[in-house]
Image (cartoon, helix red, strand yellow):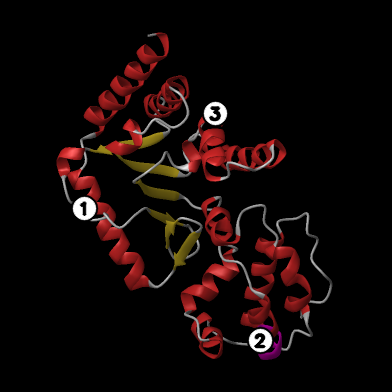
Amino acid sequence: MPGKNLDPSSSPRALLGAELRVARERAGMSQSELGEPLFVSGSFIGQLEAGTRRMHIDFARQIDDILGTNGFFTRNCGAAAKSKYPDHFAAAAEAEALATSIREYAPLIIPGLLQTEAYARAVFRAYQPTATTETIDELVTNRLDRAALLAAPTTPLLWCVFDEGVLRRAVGSPTVMAEALSHISTLVRHHRIVAQVLPFSAGAHASTGGSIKLMSFDDAPPLAYVEGSGTGLLFDDPATVTRHSLTYDLLTADALPRRESLALIESVAEDYAHDEHA
């Protein structure tokens, strides 16, 4: 039975998930059987055990009661729930760091994982025009820290479909945009990401409602994340994830092929570079 508290400096969410798996198996319960009294799916329990979903305090209390773990999960839930990201995005950001593949459709701006410092600063300043410089600096640092997962040569596989409007919308200055698009081009040419552009000529498409992020894992069910202004929803329901996966497949079918997409990204980057010297 779990006894001592977890060390918050040692990936507390992953440790808490590992302890949950041990306690559940010791109790002779399947993931679905534990999920039933919590009114969640077995997949959700699997995500908790893999550390890709955060354990909320209400779940922790119920799990302690069901598994007879003497308040262990209630005591340690706080450390595992701490995040430097907004509440609506925290679970998605932390799952993203564990994903083996990420597929994302960006309808409005360059995704956070691919933003340059100057681009991210312009985005945050537009969203919070009266924030202090210190606040913006912290937001930018956190966003750039997320991109560290791209330092690995192959994992995760990152596949992005950009709406053409993402390229054409001048965030910051022409200099900022030229740098931002050149950064994407470099990642593509170094075979670190896959990028496609959904052109304006595609007209109506499968995801006119907004962004999609699909994440797959080695040891946990896949997740789908959809986001709006200041809101976000993370789904593990298989039917919902499958539906969003189909939507993404339809987007890639309507998007330009990879070579044509890269050519367009680089052409627009050159246009911005020309504008900055005009």
* Magenta span: 62-67
**Main SS class of the magenta portion in the image:** helix
Image location of residue 139, percent across then percent down: 63, 43
Image location of residue 174, percent across then percent down: 42, 21
Circle on res. 62: 2
SS for callout 3? helix
Q: Type of residue at label 1?
A: Leu
Is residue 164 a member of the stretch shown in magenta?
Answer: no
State the quadrant of the N terminus. Answer: bottom right
Name which of mark 3 and mark 1 comes first in the sequence.
3
Q: Type of residue at label 3?
A: Ala
State the quadrant of the C terminus. Answer: top left
39 vs 16, left or right, is left
Circle on res. 118: 3
Q: Type of residue at label 2?
A: Gln
Of 113 and 12, nearer the camera is 113
* C-alpha separation, residue under disc 1 versus residue under disc 2: 41 Å
Residue denoted by label 1:
250
Label count reads 3
Q: Is residue 97 above or below residue 133?
A: below
Can the viewer see residue 152 in this picture?
Answer: no
SS for callout 1? helix
Name which of mark 3 and mark 2 comes first in the sequence.
2
Q: Is residue 230 above or below residue 196?
A: below
